[in-house]
Image: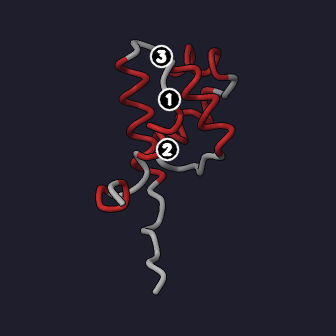
Amino acid sequence: MITQRPAYDYAALGVAISKARRAAELTVEALGERSGVSRRHLIDIEQGNKKVSAGLLYAIAAGLGIDGGDLFREGYPDSARDS
């Protein structure tokens, strides 16, 4: 039997990006400059209003100076992260 993974939670990913940005003491504008992502798009991502491609996620992670995989895992419920 195949176990289906829970749906990816883009809102949780957005919260993780926002927390990481604030921890790095970056404004949305500064992260945008570092990652090549527009201010408006970053705001939409942080608010969970936009889906994020793998390439975009890794560009944001690079702008934050963190591992993209760590950010990606934030979008899965706790039970799915451990499996």
Q: Is residue 52 left or right of residue 14?
A: right
Residue visible at 58% across and 29% down? Answer: 60
* x, y percent for residue 40: 61, 33
Closer to viewer: mark 3 or mark 1? 1
* x, y percent for residue 17: 45, 33
Residue type at numbered disc 3 = Thr
Q: Nearer the viewer, residue 45 or 71?
A: 71
| 45 w.r.t. 8: above or below | above
Secondary structure of the residue carrying numbered label 2: helix
Dividing the picture into quadrants, the one containing residue 13 is: top left
Residue denoted by label 3: 27
| 9 w.r.t. 46: above or below | below
Residue denoted by label 1: 67
Residue visible at 38% across and 40% down? Answer: 15
Residue type at numbered disc 2 = Phe
CA distance for labels 3 and 1: 19 Å
Q: Is residue 48 left or right of residue 78?
A: right
CA distance for labels 2 and 1: 9 Å
